[in-house]
Image (cartoon, rainbow, N blue to C red):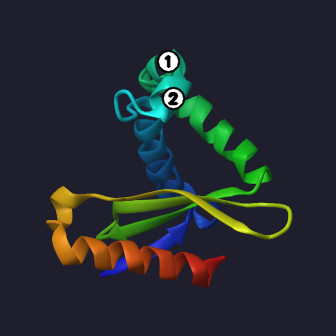
Amino acid sequence: MIESHLLTEKSGKELARANNYLRRWIAYPDKGSDFDKKQGCLKYTLRIPLIGQVIVPLAIKWLEKKGYDGLFLEENQNIIGHNAFQVHSDNSLHVFSIYIYLQIIGGGALHFNLVYLLQIMLLQKV
């Protein structure tokens, strides 16, 4: 069964799993992407497990105060996709990252449907 959870709703082991997922995304950006270029040396620092496990949860708390959050798409307690967004002070929603693992679902129409489902779930939660 596919479920969705906001990062701000997570706690305990679920939060630790989400933090680890985010650490991997930040530490291993797509090579040559704008995000990769903006990361600079930070991405290498976050690849050191102990450092990343301390810094990422602190950064997430700081980003939450700025209106950032993430919606995770999960199946059998495995994160299969995410949607990162920010709610601005005027309550406008700004989505800046959507990702579904193609190797898990196969792609094609199912991929499109899951991206669409992720957006609907986001609108219902925010």
Which residue: 49% across, 24% down?
37
Looking at the picture, tell me which residue is in the foreground, 98 or 105: 98
- Quarter-of-image position of residue 76: bottom left
Residue 35 lies left or right of residue 8; in this view the side is left
Label 1 sits on a secondary structure element that is helix
Q: Residues within 10 Å of mark 2 (few under 14, many from 20)?
A: many
- Quarter-of-image position of residue 126: bottom right
Label 2 sits on a secondary structure element that is helix
Question: Where residue 124 sits: x, y (%)?
Answer: 59, 84
> For mark 2, what is the residue?
52
Q: Are marks 2 and 1 in contact (CB under 8 Å)?
A: yes
Residue 86 lies left or right of residue 39; in this view the side is right
Above or below 61: residue 37: above
Earlier residue among tags 2 and 1: 1
Q: Residues within 10 Å of mark 1 (few under 14, many from 20)?
A: some
Q: CA distance from mark 2 to mark 1?
A: 7 Å
Which residue: 52% across, 18% down?
40
- Say the numbered circle drawn on residue 114: none
Question: Where residue 102 sits: x, y (%)?
Answer: 21, 59
Q: How many numbered circles does the render carry? A: 2
Question: Where residue 17 sits: x, y (%)?
Answer: 44, 51
Amino acid type at image mark 2 = Gly
Amino acid type at image mark 1 = Thr
Q: Nearer the viewer's eye, disc 2 or disc 1?
A: 1
- Say the numbered circle drawn on residue 45: 1
